[in-house]
């Protein structure tokens, strides 16, 4: 993995994390927005500008790819590189969570 890409994405923003998580199944933009909102119980509502800016950057960086175009909609899916970064971020989050056990109530 390119260390420059890893440095950019780890730690990962919630937006990037949820976009990559949503793209475990192929989706177009509006479906990504709906899925992220559903996953976060409405806590995160991605705006179109934020979403499409993130998708363009992630595609340029090789984290996602367009798998097909239907009725002018670009259908995206996560790449192997995107999944690698998602696993690294998951491990980082697990470590953070485990270390909270040291906090006294």
Image (spheres, grey):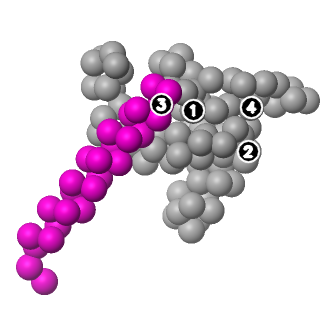
Residue for point 74% across, 31% down:
75
Looking at the rendered structure, the secondary structure element under dot 2 is: helix
Residue for point 62% across, 62% down:
38
Looking at the rendered structure, the secondary structure element under dot 4 is: strand
Task: Give percent across and percent down for residue 103.
Answer: 10, 73
Task: Give percent across and percent down for residue 64.
Answer: 57, 27
Q: CA distance from mark 2 to mark 3?
A: 20 Å
In the image, residue 84 sits, relative to residue 15, either above or below, namely above
Inspect this view and state whether residue 29 appears: no
User: Which of the marked residues, 3 or 4, is nearer the chain's N terminus?
Assistant: 4
Q: Which residues are magenta?
A: 80-105
In the image, residue 2 sits, relative to residue 49, either above or below, namely above
Q: CA distance from mark 2 to mark 4?
A: 10 Å
In magenta stretch: residue 94: yes
User: Which of the marked residues, 2 or 3, is nearer the chain's N terminus?
Assistant: 2
In the image, residue 102 sits, relative to residue 45, either above or below, namely below
The answer to the question of whether label 1 and label 2 lie on touching residues, with beta carbons closer than 8 A, is no
Looking at the rendered structure, the secondary structure element under dot 1 is: strand
Q: Is residue 80 left or right of residue 87?
A: right
Q: Which residue is mark 2?
A: 30
Q: CA distance from mark 4 to mark 1?
A: 11 Å
User: Which of the marked residues, 2 or 4, is nearer the chain's N terminus?
Assistant: 2
Q: Which mark is residue 82?
A: 3
Q: Which residue is mark 1?
A: 78
Inspect this view and state whether residue 72 appears: yes
Q: Which residue is mark 4?
A: 75
Dot 1 alpha-carbon crowd within 10 angstroms: few under 14, some 14 to 19, many 20 or more: many
Q: Nearer the viewer, residue 86 or 56?
A: 86
Dot 3 alpha-carbon crowd within 10 angstroms: few under 14, some 14 to 19, many 20 or more: many
Q: CA distance from mark 3 to mark 1?
A: 6 Å
Q: Quadrant of the N terminus?
A: top left
Residue for point 28% across, 18% down:
3
């Amino acid at each position: 993995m390119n260390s420059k890409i890893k440095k950019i994405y780890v730690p990962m923003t919630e937006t990037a994390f949820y976009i990559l998580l949503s793209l475990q199944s192929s989706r177009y933009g509006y479906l990504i927005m709906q899925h992220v909102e559903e996953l976060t119980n409405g806590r995160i509502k991605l705006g179109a500008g934020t979403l499409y800016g993130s998708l363009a950057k992630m595609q340029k960086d090789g984290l996602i790819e367009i798998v097909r175009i239907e009725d002018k909609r670009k259908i995206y899916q996560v790449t192997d590189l995107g999944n690698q970064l998602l696993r690294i971020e998951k491990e980082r989050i697990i470590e953070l969570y485990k270390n909270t056990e040291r906090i006294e109530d």
